[in-house]
Image (spheres, rainbow, N blue to C red):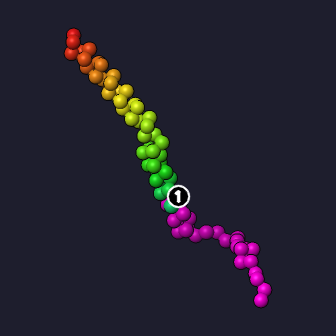
Amino acid sequence: MQNKNPFKNLGQPPVEASEKLKKKVMDGVESIELLRDITTLFTVNYGSALVDLFTINSKDKKRNKRDNNN
């Protein structure tokens, strides 16, 4: 029994992918990019967003105290 490597014949001859397959692949890529962006929003940028939020709130409180005293 001779073992043939099936991977040597992949892409022989080159064949153009169908539009349906191309669309399916691009939809998958877009979904993964959206998931990556959402994950980044809630993980990597979460700390800086909280710092910005508290900085803005503390500045507003100081401004409100100053305005109410006048």
Q: Quick one: 52 or 21, which is closer to the camera? A: 52
Q: Quadrant of residue 66?
A: top left
Q: Quadrant of residue 54?
A: top left
In the picture, which quadrant includes the N terminus? bottom right
The number of discs equals 1
How would you rate the neighbour count of disc 1 (Cα within 10 Å): few for under 14, some for 14-19, many for 20 or more? few
Q: Secondary structure at mark 1?
A: helix
| Image location (x, y in percent) of residue 32 | 50, 56
Residue placed at 74% from the left, 77% from the top? 5
Which residue type does callout 1 highlight?
A: Val
Q: Is residue 66 above or below residue 6?
A: above
Magenta stretch bounds: 1-27
Q: Quick one: 34 or 26, which is closer to the camera? A: 34
| Image location (x, y in percent) of residue 21 | 55, 68
Q: Quadrant of residue 60?
A: top left
- Image side of residue 15 versus residue 18, left or right: right
| Image location (x, y in percent) of residue 46 | 42, 40
> Does the magenta run of residues contain 20?
yes
| Image location (x, y in percent) of residue 17 | 61, 69
- Image side of residue 54 versus residue 15, left or right: left
> Which residue was labeled with disc 1?
29
What is the residue that sits farthest to the top in this orientation?
Answer: 70
Residue placed at 47% from the left, 46% from the top? 40
Residue placed at 28% from the left, 22% from the top? 61
In the picture, which quadrant includes the C terminus? top left
What is the residue that sits farthest to the bottom in this orientation?
Answer: 1
> Does the magenta run of residues contain 22?
yes
